[in-house]
Amino acid sequence: CRTGARPVFSDIDPATYNIDPMQVENKITPRTRAILVVHLFGQCADMEPLWIIAERHDLILIEDAAQALGAEYQGKRAGSLGCLGCLSFYPTKNLGAYGDAGMVVTNDPEWANRMKCLRVHGMEPRYHHKYLGWNARLDALHAAMLRVKLPHLERWISSRQAIAARYDALIEEHHLSHFLERPIRRPNRRHTFNQYVVRVANGQRDALVRHLRAEQIGCEIYYPLALHQQECLRHLGYGTGDFPASEKAAGQVLALPIYPELSAEQQRRVIQSCAAFLRQQVRRAA
């Protein structure tokens, strides 16, 4: 919106929470210039149909891979699947700096030169401003920290994958599969589990959040509102019911604790607490 462009939203695949390619093409008009794809929670969106759509309509394909560093689609890394890939190094990400940091990657020399120019106030050459750019340089201290942490990324991702598999097994072991719907991993993709997100059944998500927090167990809702429901985007004219899959997910999703150092004992406590909550609800309903 800040550039004068008008975002046009499209609904999600309810299984992966990523954009549903089947709904994209009918959103395209002669004014459309790009498709912006978000790889949510550590799993890539279904890119092949989006490649076809982008080529058919001569559109730029931009990846928001902020949560998907190290994720793969058909053997290719997130960030390398479009014209431009946007990465985040915020501390909560799988590879984090000590504060706000990020990167744009591309294999197109023209786009690379433009990004380099935009990051230094649009200057090219010095003190000649070709574009209205930003002060978007990555601080040297951030870069130094990331350089030290980068060799550990694969080990951290492997730990997250093992933790996710353990959550899956614990949910099954405690007979919670009907209450906590586990994340789906699509074939030919590498899920890096920036978050481990379940769907909570029976409208009990918010009550479960209160229960877990009372037990001093961290959890988070990503995200409590779909984008079209955010106050700052009401001017776009969307209303309740326009994106039913996104709206339903916003009322059900819950991220359980996940980080490379999370122990099996800590995970068991998380799931045991979820099971205790469900038993309480069953007793109250009896």
Image (tube, rainbow, N blue to C red):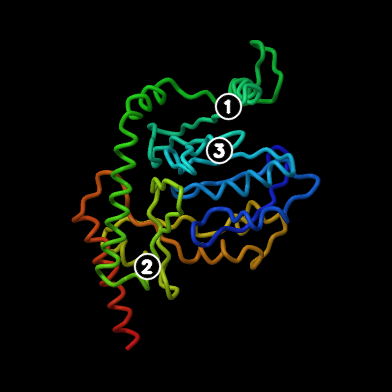
Is any part of residue 121 visible from this angle?
no
Q: Residue furthest left?
A: 265
Q: Amino acid at mark 3?
A: Leu
> Which quadrant holds the N terminus?
top right
In which image quadrant can residue 95 be found? top left
Task: Give neighbour class at mark 2: few <14, some 14-19, many 20+ (Cα, 10 Å).
Answer: many
Residue 10 locus on image (x, y percent): 64, 55
The CA distance from mark 2 to mark 1 is 41 Å
Q: Which mark is residue 180?
A: 2
Drawn side of residue 131 relative to residue 268, left or right: right
Q: Taking 6 as reference, is 248 above or below it?
A: below
Is 38 or 120 nearer to us in this picture? 38
Q: Which residue is mark 1?
A: 107
**Helix, strand or loop at mark 1:** loop
Q: Which residue is mark 3?
A: 81
> Which quadrant holds the C terminus?
bottom left
Drawn side of residue 64 relative to residue 263, left or right: right
- Which one is in front in this view, the residue at disc 3 or the one at disc 2? 3
Residue 41 locus on image (x, y percent): 45, 50
Q: Amino acid at mark 1?
A: Asn
Please tell me which of labels 3 and 2 falls first in the chain. 3
Label pair 2/1, CB-CB below 8 angstroms: no
In which image quadrant can residue 149 be found? top left
Q: Amino acid at mark 2?
A: Leu
Please tell me which of labels 1 and 3 falls first in the chain. 3
The CA distance from mark 1 to mark 3 is 10 Å
Task: Give neighbour class at mark 1: few <14, some 14-19, many 20+ (Cα, 10 Å).
Answer: few
The CA distance from mark 3 to mark 2 is 32 Å
Residue located 59% across and 33% down the image: 84
Residue located 28% across and 77% down the image: 279
Please tell me which of labels 2 and 1 falls first in the chain. 1
